[in-house]
Amino acid sequence: MKKRSKRYEFFETLEVNKDTFLHEIPEIGLLTTQSPSDPRPSLKIVDGRVVEMDGKPLEDFDLIDRFIADYSLDLEIAEEAMALGSLEFARRIVDINVPRSEIVKYAGGMTPAKIVEVVSHLNPVEMMMAVQKMRTRRTPANQAHVCNKKDDPALLAAEAATAALVGFAELETTIGVSRHAFSNALGILIGSQIGRPGTLTQCSCEEALELSIGMRGFTTYAETLSVYGTEKVFQDGDDLPWSKMFLGSAYLSRGLKNRFTSGSGSEVLMGGGEGKSMQYLEARCLALVRGSGTQGVQNGGIDCTPINSALPGGQLSVMAENLIAMLWDLECASGNDTPWSGSPTREVAHMLPWIVTGTDFIHSGFGATTASDNMFSGSGFNIENLDEEIALQRDFKIDCGLKSVAEEEVIAVRSKAAKAMQTLCEVLDFPRYTDEQIEKVIYAHSSDDIDRDLNDNIRMSQEILKRHLTIVDVIKALAEAGETEIAETLLNMVKQRMAGDYLQTSGIYDHNLQCISAINDANDYAGPGSGYRVSEDRWAEIKGIRQAKSFDDFTASQRWDGASSVGLRLTLKEVGPASKGTGLDEVVVGISPAFAQDLNKTLAGLYVGDVLYELLAGIEEEGCVSRVVRIENSTDLGMIGLKAAKLSGSGIAIGLQSKGTTIIHQKDLPPLDNLELFPMGPLLTLETYRKIGRNASLYAKGQQPPTIPTIWGQSILQIRARAEPIVVMLQQIEEKNIHKDKDCAELEVKFIPLEENEK
Amino acid sequence: MKNHWVSFQDYPFGKKRPDLIKTLTGKSWDDITLTAVLNGAVTDQDIRISPDTLLLQAKIAELAGRKRLADNFRRAAELCHVPDDKVMEIYNALRPFRRTREELEAMADELERDYAVLNANLVREAAAAYEKRGFLKNPPPAA
């Protein structure tokens, strides 16, 4: 065995190096773009009929070519569009002076090979500029997965209510067991309308079953109408472009919104890549979507994202496929769902472009439950990451369609949703929920926290099926049981299906149950100052995350109350101006203006009384005498230390700020110099303070004290990151306690044992 | 076909022009109330979208330059009165190797008789394409 570098052995432990990275294999189509077998763009039209497309003559057309030629291409503009230089058109896409409508017009006449050639000229930043302009709806939105591994309908309702309240415009559930489909769909429908009326819901399952659930009124949209870029793989999926096209119309005929699903890599995964690049095949899929007249698509890798992540240019290619969908004027639910990598850095990098630009649905689905309850074999982002995305909105002043909600609000909607399901089970004579079970649902974090018999869920779904129950029966049952408000809300959603407004491209409902789509909220980006901008109200909402603290919150939490973790209450009594000491064995401790007045805890969370106790104990352990003075007119640690040192009989002093930063100073040094400095307030322990006290004593006695070790490492950097903003607050409070007219005050120090009940 | 004089000003209809909306069974927007549901005056068919409403949406899509989506709305309008089971049957028939050319043609004729002309055309176009590429069910051997 070769001798191993410890560095390279360490590298092997990293998540990024557990990811799979592959070299391209063009022969089987395992590459993102520019396969040697990809066709050159071409189009020949004779007598209004396409006779050659992307290098292939009419007689060789497969089903997909024929479908694209017959339905997808806008033949009126096609010849002009194909004649445009791809680089020139790519430039127009990012040119703010060329309106979106003009891009859409020409893109509609481009073949799959042509559109791929166009986007190949764009780098990631240009893709982002393009998406900002080309997405169909002006206002960005987000979609969530809502599932649980027990398929419990009350928990689904509670989780859907939570996700809708947080702001997800669409909620998607799927099923562990297909027999649960009806009760799952009903659960998220009821919950979603309680969380936020107008939230759209779907239940992803087998095509025919999904349509029948929609026909009963238990869902409002569908998106798992999968299309593929080669004839062979399409056929393996037991569908063809015409059957999918018909299915899309069938959904519309029942007032159900739908979008297709594609995503590069599925063909090569199913062994049918035909040596074509993944992006070229995806462009064919998108042409099919366009030709079918469906308003939108879910793409961006989707289930095959991990294949992209293994290949060179994978991220760029996934961006490009989202962009192609938008160039063809389709609503785009832009993926960012399937886990991309085991490395959190790669995961976030994958979604960052689209959370910044905004898309019609940034995630198509963000897991709104724990990752363990996400039955879509997980999402890269789950409830564990929700607060992160909400924080990112605030960091970048961007809109991912989400808002921070208080714990009480969430409990309130979960309670309403779970109890509505309980009521429904009673009045429709489904297996019932006990009050205890509902209580658990309301307060649950995951399905591990609930305990309903799984067979009850199966029975419920079977009852819905057997008794041919529809949404009308559900509304009636709830109203009869006195749940009038919920019944009204559900009925309002039903009426939206009668109007069909949300069937237009990118239709969703805003917070006022107003339908917004690419009709009345069309993307009008034309450079800075145009397009979607975070409004003042929305900014206030984004800023006001529940974790944010005000100065007043801080002041209240810091006020001196004599608390101690070692059982000794500090009292400080001012006894006049401080005098200069004479004893050569004297070490003075100078404390900052707000110390044990308006500030009572250090950055490490230690009570300031305890810190002072340890310093004094350390000084006296080494045989010196301590004295405490308050520096009234400076908050600067160097000045505090130096002023104290000038008062000290030995010329040695310790300066201590309320936040815990400490200095050992000597009277003849410049203020910014020191004997020892302990700037990392968050890291200092009581033990360290005692050592600092001892070292000060040793300096006073003219001895060389031992080094006090400093802890360092990754976690410490995080501590520092968290402490620095707090320092700003603490500094403000220190400043408020400054007395410009005073200098140093002599303090009488006492530590009084706390009574049992005070600890 | 009725001429619908609508524009973006009327959209969304649910908010701005509920007077234009009739359900599949001819009920108006204001007929659908909770009281009516409680009285049993509303069935699941009463709350379905109507062909006329889908044609209004087709018009809006067309005004927005979305010809293909408009066509989709028009095909959907034809399917409103086709029963659920029949819709599922047509979908399944269009999947690979399910029907012979003759069976698909017969299905198209039936659709045409039921005034679903656009869908009939779609089925015929599919049949022609499937035949060319071998995605039809093989006809039973001649007796």
Image (spheres, rainbow, N blue to C red):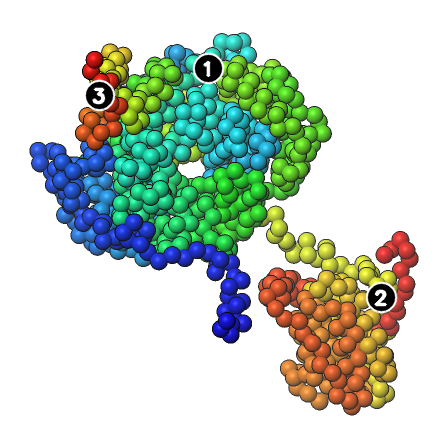
Chain letter belonging to callout 2: A
Q: CA distance from mark 1 to mark 3?
A: 36 Å
Whether residues under marks 1 and 3 lie with C-beta atoms below 8 angstroms apart, the answer is no
Disc 1 designates what residue?
B44
Q: Return the residue at label 2.
A: A570
> Which residue shows up at 11% across the image and 33% down it?
A48
Label 3 residue SS: helix
Considering only order in the chain, which callout, 3 or 1, is on the residue closer to the N terminus? 1
| Residue B80 position by quadrant | top left
Q: Residue at x 22, y 24 (%)?
A: B127
Q: Quadrant of the C terminus of chain A?
A: bottom right
Of all chains, the one bearing label 3 is B
> Could you say whether the residue bearing mark 2 is in a helix, strand or loop?
strand
Indicate the position of residue A525 as horizontal and vertical percent values.
Answer: 33, 47
> Which residue, as the protein is rendered here, is positioned at the far front?
B143
How far, Cα to Cα, is label 1 from label 2?
A: 74 Å
Q: Is residue A138 above or below residue A85?
A: above
Residue flagged by tag 1: what amino acid is it? Asp
Asked if labels 3 and 2 share a chain, the reply is no
